[in-house]
Amino acid sequence: TGSSRPQRLLKAVQRNAAKGDPQSVISAIDYFCRHSEWAMNVGDEKGSILDSVVSEVSPTTALELGTYCGYSTVRIARLLPPGASLITLEFNPDYAAVARQVIAHSGLQDKIHLVEGPSGDSIPKLKERFGITSLDFVFLDHWKDRYVPDTKLLEECGLLRKGSVLLADNVICPGAPEYLDYVRNNPRYESRYFQSHLEYTNVEDGLEKSVFLG
Ligand SMILES: Nc1ncc2ncn(CCCCCNC(=O)c3cc(-c4ccc(F)cc4)cc(O)c3O)c2n1
Ligand SMILES: [Mg+2]
């Protein structure tokens, strides 16, 4: 049988990006998605907003829900301060296999822990597995109907502290209405919407940034 879209995206990275150069990996994926095949990476426009939030938070411990091909994984990891690390959860083993190779090409593998499996299973094990006490930054980009249950799970597991920042992709398209309700009407969060567009299109989408108040 033929290759998959993630496998074709990986080939484009291996052909067009310089090994050990995260920015060239990001540019190669954006070029592939604009000129060859659309793929559900956060993309360059929303990616710039992601970059500014990560740079502002400068997290020591970061979590990403939904790795896919590793595009946002590389975007986040390239901005982490020395000694900081990013844990990324991916449900689909085929996506995870591609992401590992994209991450390796970027040279950032020492800053990244990719965990395969459903987020609902992995989140309760993060403290014991990685020796973390809390998360400084969380990027939500997995199943949109898992944003609320997993946010509640992060709270229940004591993984959020006063000032932890959640940034959620796709709150307009495909949409996460229950999540917007949850964080915008919850006194324990201070939320702000960053308007943008669905990756590689001019369809409206945006990111919701929510600070946990403890
Ligand atoms: N529980 C658990 N734990 C861990 C996990 N890891 C992965 N998953 C499963 C998630 C599968 C991918 C999620 N992402 C999206 O669905 C997504 C879609 C679009 C989109 C698509 C078509 C359109 F026409 C318009 C927009 C755009 C985006 O930016 C998206 O991020 C997990 N689940
Ligand atoms: Mg997304």
Image: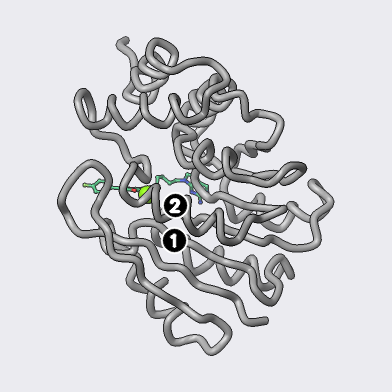
Q: Which residue is rendered at x = 45% and y = 26% of the image?
A: 25
- The answer to which of marks 2 and 1 sits earlier in the sequence is 2
Q: Is mark 2 within 8 Å of ligand 2?
A: yes
On the image, numbered disc 1 is attached to which residue?
168
Mark 1 Cα-neighbour bin, 10 Å: few <14, some 14–19, many ≥20: many
Q: Which residue is rendered at x = 71% and y = 58% of the image?
A: 124
Residue 141: numbered disc: 2
29 w.r.t. 139: above or below: above
Indicate left or right for 161 with 211 as reference: right
83 w.r.t. 54: above or below: above
Location of the C terminus (image quadrant):
bottom right
Q: Is mark 1 within 8 Å of ligand 2?
A: no
**Kind of residue at disc 2:** Asp
Q: Residue furthest bottom?
A: 187
Mark 2 Cα-neighbour bin, 10 Å: few <14, some 14–19, many ≥20: many
> Residue 4 lies in what quarter of the image?
top left
Q: Are marks 2 and 1 in contact (CB under 8 Å)?
A: yes
